[in-house]
Amino acid sequence: MKWIPNFNSSNSLRVIFVIAVFILLFLSSIAYKHNQDLNESSKVVMHTYEINIQLERLMSAIKDAETGQRGYIITRNARFLTPYIYSRDKVNTSFITLKKLTTDNPVQQENLRRLFKLIIQRFVSFENCLKYSDPKTYDKRRLDNHMFGGRILMENIRFKVDEMNDIEKTYLKNRLKIYDDEISLSPLFSISLFLTALFFILLAFRQISKDFQRLKVFNKKLLISNGLISESEVIGKFSTWQWDLDANKIDYSDNQYRLLGYQPGAFIPVKETFLDFVHPDDKETVSNSIEGIIRHKQLPFVYYKILLPSHEIRYFKSTGKLLTDQQGSNILLGINFDITDEHLLNIELQERNKELEKTNKELASFNHVASHDLQEPLRKIQTFISRISDADKAVMSQSAIDYISKIEVSAKRMRVLIDDLLLFSRTNTTKKEFIKTNLEELLENAESELTEVIEEKSAVIVANKLPKLAVIPYQIEQLFINLIGNSLKYSRPNVIPSITIESIRVNSEDYPEILDQNIKKFHKITFTDNGMGFDPQFKETIFILFQRLHSKTDYPGTGIGLAICKKIVDNHKGHIMADSEPDRGSVFTIFLPD
Amino acid sequence: MQKNALNILLADDDEDDRLFFKDAFEEIKIQTNVEFVHDGMQLMEHLMDFDNKLPDILFLDLNMPKKTGKECLIEIKKAEHLKNIIIAIYSTSSSEDDIEDTFIQGANIYIKKPSDFNTLKKIINEVVTVNWHYHTSGLNRDNFLLRLK
C-alpha cells in the first residue's frame, strides 16, 4: 500500500541515538578511570610521605638517643639517659611500620634491612661508649674510637635514610609522571567528545522536530481527507467496511451505519452482523460473495436487498478487494452502494420499455393492417373497374364513364399513398444490415429504376467518384431514387434537367451543430439540380411527412418521398439538408459516416 | 370434367377473388379443371381425401381463417404424397417476411394479387404454361416473386 507516508527518519534517529549513547558511555568510563587514577596517585603520595615521616622519626629517635647519651656522658646525670632508653622502642615501632609500608618493594626492603643492621651497630656503639665512658671502666682510647665509629655509623644511617627517601621520591615522581601522561590529553579529548555527543543529540532533536512538523501536516491532511471521505460517502450514498482478517476485527464507516438505518457507532460489528441485515432472499448470495472475495482476492459487483430495522427494503450493490498492507496483514475492503433510487428508476424504465415494445407491436400490426387489409378492398375496387369492358362503357352515359374514370384515378392515388406509407414504415422496421457497398453501384441501380423518366425528359446526370461505405444497400438506393426522382419531377418546363452529384470527405468537427461528433469523418454528397427550386423558408419543412409545397393537380405526390429520405439518412446516423432559391435549382446535401 | 386438363385448386376465403379467378380461367381458354376451397382446414381435408384427384397446381392464399396458408404449406411439404404439388402463393401481402418464409418452406412461386383483371389473366396464363420442371430447378430468391415482363 503505497499511500502510507514513509517516515524513514526514525532509522537515522536510532543510529544517531546509539552513537550519542556510546560516546557518553565512553566519556563516563574515562572519567571513572581518571578518578581511579587520581585516587591511586594520592595513595602513592601518602605512602611516600608516610615512609618519609617514619624514616625521619627513626632518625630523630636515634638522634635523641645520641643527644641523651652525650648529655649523660658529660653530666653523668641518669636523667639524660631516658630518651636513649625509649629510643630503642621508638626505633622498633618505626621499623615495624616501615617494614609494612615497604612490603611491595623488595629494593626498599633490602635497604631497610641494611638500615636496621646499621642501627643495631649504632646501638652497639652506644653501649660501648657508655661502657668506656663509665669511670669504673674508663678507657679514653676506646671511647674515642667508639665515639668516632658512632659518628661514621650515624652518617651511614643518614645516608641510607636519604637513599631510601630518594628512592621513594623517584618512585613517586615516576608514578605521578605516568598518571600525568595519562591524564594530559584527556581534557581536550573529552570536551570534543562531549561536543560531538551534544551535536548528535541536537541533530536528533532537529530531526525529531522536523518529523513532528511533517506528522502534524499529514495528520491535518488525513483529518481533512477523512472528513471529505465520510462526507462523500453520505453524498454518494455509499459506504465502506474493513475486515482485518488476521486480527478478526471489523470496522464500518459512519455511513455504513446510516445506510443500515443506525447512528454511526451504534453497535460493534462482527463477522455475522452484516448478513443479519441482508434480505432473507439474498443471504446465501451475499455470504458466498464474501467468501469469494477471500478466495479470489476481488469480486465483481453483487446486487442484493437489505432489510432495514424499519422493515424498509433498500437495494445494494457491493464489491470488495483483499488488500495486503506493508506489515503483511490481510485486510478485506468492502464497498456498498445504496442503489435503491437507481433500481426503482430502472424498474420504471423497464416498464416504460415494455410499454414501448407493446406500442411497437401495435404499430407492426397496424402495418399489417395497412399492407393487407386496407389494400384488399382497394385492389377489388381497381379489379372491378378493370372488368368494366368497352362493351359495358358503350351502353353507359358519358357522365357515368367520367365518374368511373375519376374513381379509377382516386383508387390509383390511394394505392400510391398506401405503398409510400408502407415504404416509409418499412424504412424503420425492417432489419438494418450494414454492408460495405460501392455507392456508385447503388446510383446505377437507381438510375436504371428511373430510366423511363430520365429518357422522357432527356435528363443529364453527372456524378463524380462516390465512396464505398457500410450502408443498408436497398435504403441508400431508395434514397438516390427519391432524390433524383424529386429533381426530375420538379424540373423547369422547357429546360433539360441536369443533376450533378459530388462527394467529398469532411471532418465532423467542421459541422458541430448537425453531425454526430463521436464519428470523426463523414462523406458529404451533394445533389445539385437546375430545377424550379423552392422558397428557402421551407428547407426544413419539406422533410416532414405529408408536407407538400405544390398542389396535387400540378405535381402528383404523397409528401412522403423526402420524409423517407430523412429517415434513411437518420438510420445511417447521417444528416440531410436542402437549400434552394426559386427558379435557381436546389441542392440536397447528405452526410454519411465514413 | 375434362380428362387431359390441368387440375387447378385455389384456396382463398375471399369470394370476390374466387370469382375473378374463375372468370380469368374461363377467359384464357386453357383446358383446366378449377376447384375451390374456402379455408385452410377445408384445403387440408380436400388434399387428404383420397377420393379427390390431387391438383397439379395449388394457388394458396396466406391469410385464411382456421388455418393460415403458411401452416398449410408446411403440412403439405411434410406429407409424402403431396409434396410434389406445384404451389403458387397467391396473396395480397408483398411483405419481405412472407416472401422469405414461403420460399424457405418450399413454395414454387409467389404471386402478389394484381389490381387489374387483365394482369390477373396474364399471370394465370404464365403460371399454367410454365415448364415447372425447368423453373423449379433454377429457382432462387430473385425469380421466386413473379414479375410480368
Image: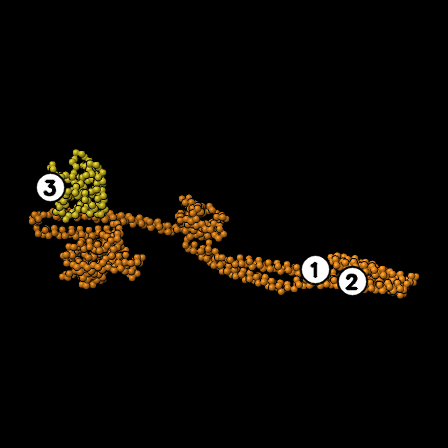
Chain colours: A orange, B yellow
Left or right of A258 on screen, residue A396: left
Kindly indicate the quadrant of the structure image that contains residue A46.
bottom right
Residue on which the image places disc 2: A160
Distance from the alpha carbon under mark 2 to that under mark 3: 181 Å
At x 81%, y 60%, the residue is A118
Secondary structure under badge 3?
A: loop
Q: Are labels 1 and 3 assigned to the same chain?
A: no
Residue on which the image places disc 1: A40
Quarter occupied by the C terminus of chain A: bottom left
**Closer-to-camera residue (B15/A75):** A75
Chain under numbered label 2: A
Kindly indicate the quadrant of the structure image that contains residue A450.
bottom left
**Closer-to-camera residue (A293/A393):** A293
Provide residue A493's location: percent of width, then percent of height. 14, 61
Left or right of A218 on screen, residue B117: left
Q: Residue furthest bottom?
A: A74
Secondary structure under badge 2?
A: helix
At x 62%, y 63%, the residue is A190
Please name which of the two marks, 2 or 1, marks the residue nearer to the observer. Answer: 2
Discs 2, 1 touching: Cβ within 8 Å: no
Distance from the alpha carbon under mark 1 to that under mark 3: 157 Å
Q: Is any part of residue A302 visible from this angle?
A: yes
Residue on which the image places disc 3: B30
Q: Amino acid at mark 1?
A: Glu
Q: Amino acid at mark 2?
A: Lys
Q: Residue furthest right?
A: A136
Mark 3 is surrounded, within 10 Å at the Cα level, by few (under 14), some (14 to 19) or many (20 or more) other residues, namely few
Left or right of A373 on screen, residue A358: right
Please name which of the two marks, 2 or 3, marks the residue nearer to the observer. Answer: 2
